[in-house]
Structures are given as C-alpha cells and as structure tokens.
Amino acid sequence: MADPGTPAQGYPGRLIVFEGLDGSGKSTQARLLGKWLQSRGYRVFHTEWNSSELVSESIRRGKKKGLLTPTTFSLLHATDFADRFERQILPPLRAGYLVVCDRYSFTAFARDEARGCAPTWVRNLYLFAPKPDRTYYFRVPVDVTLRRKRASRSKISYYEAGMDLGLSDQTEESYRRFQGRLKQAYDRMARTERFTILDARGSVETIQQSLRADLAPLLQGFPTGERLQHEG
C-alpha cells in the first residue's frame, strides 16, 4: 500500500481531522471544537469536504444528472481535495494555525473503495496530503445514523445511499448496505492509520469533553494568537 503522505508535524500549524459516517455527529463536534479553541486564544481555520469552488459545480451537476461513474466520482473529488488543500489547508498550516478538517483524504479512501475503486490507485491520488496530527473517527452503528436521519427529517441523497451501485431498489436498504461498506473501511483504517476512536453514540457534551482532553498534549506549548503577536 502506498504511503498516504508525510506527517503534518513538518508545518508550524497542527492538522486535526474528523472522520466518520454521515450522521455520526462529527460536523457538529468539529464546529464546537473550533469555537472552543478560538475562545482559548488559538488561531483556527475550519474547512469542509467538497468545498472547493473549482469543481463543486461539476460535481453537483454530475450527481444531479447521475453521470458519475466510480472512477469519475473519485477523480473529481481528488481534484476538489487538491484545490482545497492548496488554497484552504496548506496556507494556514504554514502560518501556524490549528486547521480543523471536517473530512480529509480518508473519506475518499472509504467511499472510493466502497464503490469498487482499487485502494492503491485511490491512495496514490492523495500522496501529497500530509498525515494529520490527530484523526478522530466517530464510530457509530449504521442503524443509529439512519434513525438520526429520520429524526432530523433530512432526506437521504442518491449517492449517500449508494443508489448508483444497484445495491437495492429501496433507499433505506441501499443506505444500510452502502454505509455498512463505509463503516468496514473506516474500521480497518482505524487500525492501520491509528485513528483516535470516539463512541459517537454518546452525548454531544461528553464527546466534546473527550476531544478537549485528548487534544491537551498536542496543544501544550502551542502558541496562541496573543503569543504569536508578542513573539513577532
């Protein structure tokens, strides 16, 4: 298997990544952590998956018209990530920020593998991406994410359910099968990539406290905005 990249410790900043299934609560926790870090005086930059303006419209149109094959899907998202990395992630890392990523290259590894792409080929697309300083995996059963979707009345999208793979004609059943594939991929990466695993079934407050406690050693001695200005 190809090496997924060099450590982020080569930059003055720190790279903190949140991964997990849709509905695992990772996005909520990423936002809360970012706000807490800012309140402590740290310079924080928050970035999300599929947020590059370069190809977002192409991805949106491709999804809407059902034109994306697994390979096309993979290449478009790799392009999106590369642009996002160069424009949104790398500059603040070089400037000494805490970069909080709601999804990173591991999302592509899980999704593309679940869609049948060769794992080594996919990873080679992301060799430029440094290893995060922390990767938090919000592990949760698929049925829990489905219940949360129902409770929020959030519509399950075509690709989120893996309907393009012909797993089932029923949206919820296809969702279970596809998200199950993603969970298996994440569980494997959790071991090989040394993710920090969080039980995403816990309360928002409990999980947030666990995140803050785990980050404490990484933040020890890391400069806040005030200290950076003073040192400058």
Image (spheres, helix red, strand yellow):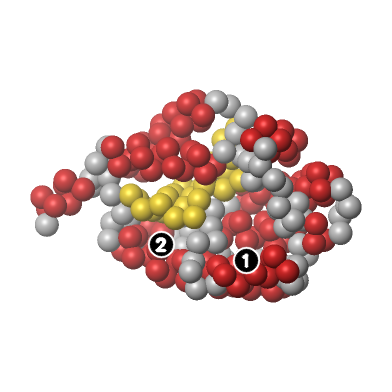
Q: Callout 2: 10 Å neighbours few (<14), some, many (20+)?
A: many
Q: Name the side, left or right, on which 87 lies relative to 164.
A: left
Whole-percent x, y for residue 131 in the image: 48, 58
Q: Quadrant of residue 212?
A: top left
Q: Quadrant of residue 149?
A: top right
- From this viewpoint, is residue 145 visible? no
Whole-percent x, y for residue 147 in the image: 72, 33
Q: Secondary structure at mark 1?
A: helix
Whole-percent x, y for residue 160 in the image: 71, 53
Whole-percent x, y for residue 65 in the image: 73, 69
* Residue beneath the point at 50% across and 25% down: 206
Q: Earlier in the sequence, mark 2 or mark 1?
A: 1
- Quadrant in which the N terminus is drawn: bottom right
User: Is residue 125 or residue 91 the one in the foreground?
Assistant: 91
Between the residue at mark 2 and the residue at mark 1, the CA separation in whole angstroms equals 22 Å
Q: Name the side, left or right, on which 230 lies relative to 57.
A: left
User: Is residue 9 or residue 42 the one in the foreground?
Assistant: 42
- Quadrant in which the C terminus is drawn: bottom left
Q: Callout 1: 10 Å neighbours few (<14), some, many (20+)?
A: few
Residue 89: which numbered mark, if any? 2
Q: Say what amino acid the circle numbered 2 marks.
A: Ile
Q: In this rendering, is residue 159 above or below 198?
A: below
* Residue beneath the point at 47% across and 53% down: 101
Q: Are marks 2 and 1 in contact (CB under 8 Å)?
A: no
Q: Secondary structure at mark 2?
A: helix
Circle 1 residue: 60
